[in-house]
Image (spheres, grey):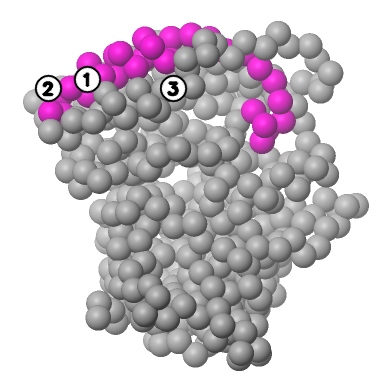
Amino acid sequence: MNTEKLQKNNLSTEKKQLWVSWNENIKHRYKTIHAIDNEDQFAQIIKTSENVRYFGNKQSSSDICAGTETLINIENYDQLLDTNTELRKVTVQAGMKLKDLLEFVESQNWCIPCLPDINTVTIGGALATGTHGTSGNILASYVVECRFISADGSIKIITAEDELMDAVRVSMGVLGAFSTVTFQCEESYTLHLTEGPEKDKDWMPQLQNYIDTYAFLRILWLPHTDVGYVIKGNKVQADKVVEENLGPKYLKHRRKASKLLYKYSHVVPWSTYFANKLLYHGFFSSKKEHKGSLYQATVTKSRGSTLELAEWTIALDVFPQVFEELKTVINSFKNNSFIHIPMDIRFVDEDQSWLSYAYKQKTVTMGCVSRNAATANSYEAFETIERIFLKYGGRPHWGKRFAAKEADFSKVYPKWEAFKTLRKQMDPTNKLLNPYLASLFAEKTKVYDD
């Protein structure tokens, strides 16, 4: 262990005292923050800390990254370590940005078949919170081996054959920290995508047919309009000629228009109803057609402004009932549950990860966004969507906003009690819990607020 290097990378309280999230609405004081760039540092800091959390790009809407006396910044722990060309495997450090991983994978003519909407998160954070895309498995399902740092600083090598892998793949960093990660990639493919608006009465009855027919399906649902913007894609030969149509040039200004139209929606919630109709006609009424690799065609390469997100998942066979109840509630002027557009609807195949949203069930995910991050606490829609999804056995996205607690999770995650038992075995002193995470597991931990 290079003690001199560790001290150099330690940022003292005098230089910085406040940890602030990307949205600037989660803030925590800390005593010590370490910027690490090697595994020895990572493990040693965890071993010698009384209470510690680790973070990357700070983009989580849930309070899982800080709130402890000691913090570890993994952003510089970001190297590509090994490539197995024959088996299409790549090993990286957990602080690498998803962008860098995916661009390398693209350069090899490979792909990871299910990609999230954005590429700015770190690998460790993406895995810990169950990041996913659509029409495939969660990202963590493609991890076939990892080096994992436990609360005592020891390092475990976990392979896909180990039972422990199903527990650690999605574990919010409470079992330990991903150090290095090996992904199983697949051969790249080209998608031919068509996009356009469809009325709810047309796309909803066709939902299962769409899922069965298309290799890629995503629906940007537009609350208060009875319309979904449906994105459908099939695999084609790379040389297939597609007459590209990306719609009017002004579509690139949608986020600016949304920010303007929603500026005072926290003061006058019903104004969202009319803002959504304007945004639909202005930005979601045209059709598009294009082709590209999964990464080229479907991943947003940047996110220009902060926002607050909640996302809930539900079993595919229950989704139509949940959708109709949600529509009824939010279309009523008897409450203030007016939702900014779009609500992102995606589809995830079942897997075996204990705290995965898709654990042993085909799943529909539905995002709920507030374009006004600073006023998100008064955004009634978050409470409404949570209440409805919980009623039908829904599960929250671990990296996004929710109010559910331990009693709720025990009802919807079959392996919840087993996970709690394992967590206590691997971290008996609750070293890896901050107050927010402690509340999720009905545990106690130190509150650091000096």
**Magenta part of the protein: which range?**
268-297
Q: Is residue 71 left or right of residue 439?
A: right
- Is 296 rendered above or below residue 379? above
Q: Quadrant of residue 294?
A: top right
Mark 3–mark 1 distance (CA, rounded to whole Å)? 20 Å
Q: Is residue 258 left or right of residue 138?
A: left
Amino acid bearing label 2? Phe
- Residue 335, horizontal then vertical, whole percent: 11, 30
Residue ID at (84%, 18%): 239
Mark 2–mark 1 distance (CA, rounded to whole Å)? 9 Å
- Residue 107, horizontal then vertical, whole percent: 80, 42
Q: Quadrant of residue 343?
A: top left
| Circle nearer the N terminus (2, 1) | 1
- Disc 1 marks which residue? 273
Q: Helix or strand or loop: what does disc 1 sit on?
A: helix
Q: Are marks 2 and 3 in contact (CB under 8 Å)?
A: no
Quarter of the picture containing the N terminus is bottom right
Q: Is residue 413 left or right of residue 446?
A: right
Amino acid bearing label 3? His
